[in-house]
Amino acid sequence: MNAPSNIATGTVVDARNLRKHYKNKLALDGTNFHIPTGRIIGLIGPNGAGKTTALKAMLGLIPFEGELSVLGRDPRTQRDDLMRDVCFIADVAVLPRWIKVKEAIEFVAGVHPRFDRAKCERFLAHTQLKPELRVRELSKGMIVQLHLALVMAIDAKLLVLDEPTLGLDILYRKQFYQRLLEDYFDEEKTIIVTTHQVEEIEHILTDVMFIRDGKIVLDAPMEAIGDRYVELLVNGDRTDEARNLKPIDERALPFGKTVMLFDGIEQARLSALGETRTPGLADLFVATMKGTYA
Amino acid sequence: MNAVAETRTHSAAAPHSTHKLKLLLKREFWEHKGGFFWAPLVAGGISLLLTILGIIFGEITARRAMADGKLKFDDGVVINGLDLGALTGRLGPEEMTKLGHGIDLSLFVASSWPFIVLGFVVFFYCLGALYDDRKDRSVLFWKSLPISDRDTVVSKVLSALLVAPILALAASLVTMVGFMLVLSAVVLLHGGNPFTLLWSPGSPLSVVSAFMIGIPVYALWALPTAGWLLLCSAWARSKPFLWAIMIPVFSGIFVSWFDLTRLFNLDSSWYWKHIVGRMLLGTFPGTDLLYQDDFGKGVGDVAGSLHQISAATALHSLAMPELWIGAAAGLAMIFGAIRLRRWRDEG
């Protein structure tokens, strides 16, 4: 049809020097990033770092400055066209409260050329969502189930999820990401997700981007994280020696042990000083964002 | 890898055709079924109920009066029960015409209730149309679908100015039929023939045609009000009602206070009538009649009033430049609402 050329080259989002300021603060400050096809990218940052603003810019919901191409289109001027290939869940439970389950399905089926009604009904078959129920009668978790079923039945190239599971219990959260991986994601699709529950999505991500004060401070595939960062459990007597290698973060454990996080130091050098392992995303996040709220 | 790609092409349905406008209108109807569908019907029902109550009350009073011997006909014959059959025989052609006019007028009054309700429904519908979904954040869901903001806003304008009035018209037709049936029953009870006494002198069809012609006229006339309310609805961060009312009213007070209209050799009442009035009152059907030159002529008698509410008078509104200027202003404001809908950042 009108598939833009650079899908073939595998670029979903290309952002250069994005700038957006609200009344009193800069939300995007010369942000640059590049997202290839077939990845699950976690966009992670503290509150107010510009995550939502970056996503909104990609979805053409806000005006901004800079160059941004999403699936080869400019979201500012070609949004209507873009939305046929992009889908998003922004915030939890934003389905209109008056709508019935069957009306929501009929509506999306009627307006979205890539919506597969049978698929959506299959997703809902084993849930408590009955066609006659209204959204206002559903629990938050059920609303998200419905929204996810609607979105997953759309054969979109890019799916953007902004805090999609905020406020849900762990059963719904686990189910949400499980579903997404098993029934939706494949090598032609790209998913961008933001969340504060870093631990829960870290195993499904292929790439991670940290954003702070409107700038991307880390942009790497998950494999590279393991190569670059090492967490070291330092034995009490080697602490000073380890400190000389300039850890980017350190925290004390009970019984005189210390955990240090190193950036770009060979694992072999560190293993002499204690036990090494690949750091969790959450620890890495905390280390990178130190002093954000200071 | 290959196998995966193949199963995918099989499982992924080919893009199917869409019916965006139809679904957008349906969407509005689903959300506003109460206002669009039930409210006019209920209003018609209430008008019928009041008619029936009035008739019962009248019957009781009449019977009491007869029992007391107070109710007499001109020739002094006291009759037991009102004999309408005998009455019809006495009416000459001129009286029959007058009777017909009377029937039409009461028919009009009875079946206009759904339209009065329509005025309120459309007013508040427009005020909330682009605001409510921003308030409950469901706009983020609507905007995740491939529907342009233009189509969204247009579907809301069409719902307000065509769908809602047509449903109100249907409710008013139902009311009208109900009203005629109730009157027929009363006539029958009194031994009259409803066809000679009601259906033949009255002309329900001309009342219906006046209402039907009224719909496109209404849509054009209400455009500036709908446009203004939609603009406020798309713009306000909170309290769209207050903004929508206060801006025109305070501007009117300001203009009156400083006599600004004098600069254009106009009375300040001109501003209230042609600016404030058109921004706020257009959703009430029939307000265009107030702006016609010969408004109010002959309202004193039944025939004159009927002329005021006839299809011809409704059509006459189309000849007023005010209607077209207002419609253009309305379209401009709707365009503004589309722009705001596109770029308003909820933050």
Image (tube, rainbow, N blue to C red):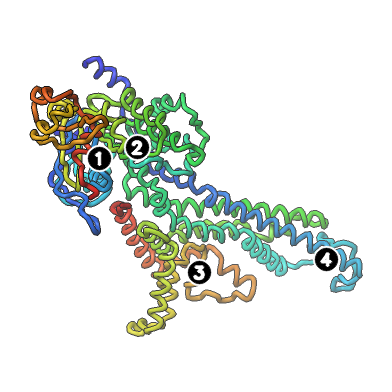
Mark 1 vs mark 4: same chain?
A: no
Tell me whether the residue at label 1 lies in contact with that at label 4, contact meaning CB atoms closer than 8 angstroms.
Answer: no
Q: Is residue A70 left or right of residue B300?
A: left
**In percent of the image, x 57 and y 69: which residue is there?**
B307
Q: Which residue is mark 1?
A: A82
Q: Label 1 lies in what chain?
A: A
Name the residue type under label 2. Pro
**Viewer-nearest residue: B143 or A271:** A271
Name the residue type under label 1. Leu
Q: Label 3 lies in what chain?
A: B
**In percent of the image, x 21 and y 28: which residue is there?**
A206
Please tell me how crowded label 2 is: few (under 14), some (14-19), or many (20+) other residues with Cα within 10 Å.
Answer: many
Q: Nearer the viewer, mark 2 or mark 3?
A: 2
Q: Which residue is mark 4?
A: B61
> Residue A52 sits in which quadrant?
top left
Q: Nearer the viewer, mark 4 or mark 3?
A: 4
Residue B211 visible in the current orientation: yes
Tell me whether the residue at label 3 lies in contact with that at label 1, contact meaning CB atoms closer than 8 angstroms.
Answer: no
Tell me whether the residue at label 4 lies in contact with that at label 2, contact meaning CB atoms closer than 8 angstroms.
Answer: no
Q: Secondary structure at mark 2?
A: loop
Residue B11 at what x, y percent from top left? 32, 21
Q: Which residue is mark 3?
A: B289
In the displayed structure, B245 sits above or below A271; it is below
Q: Secondary structure at mark 4?
A: helix
Extreme residue in the top direction: B3
Q: CA distance from mark 4 to mark 3?
A: 37 Å
Tell me whether the residue at label 2 lies in contact with that at label 1, contact meaning CB atoms closer than 8 angstroms.
Answer: no
Q: Is residue A283 left or right of residue B241?
A: left
Q: Nearer the viewer, mark 4 or mark 2?
A: 2
Q: Which residue is mark 2?
A: A164
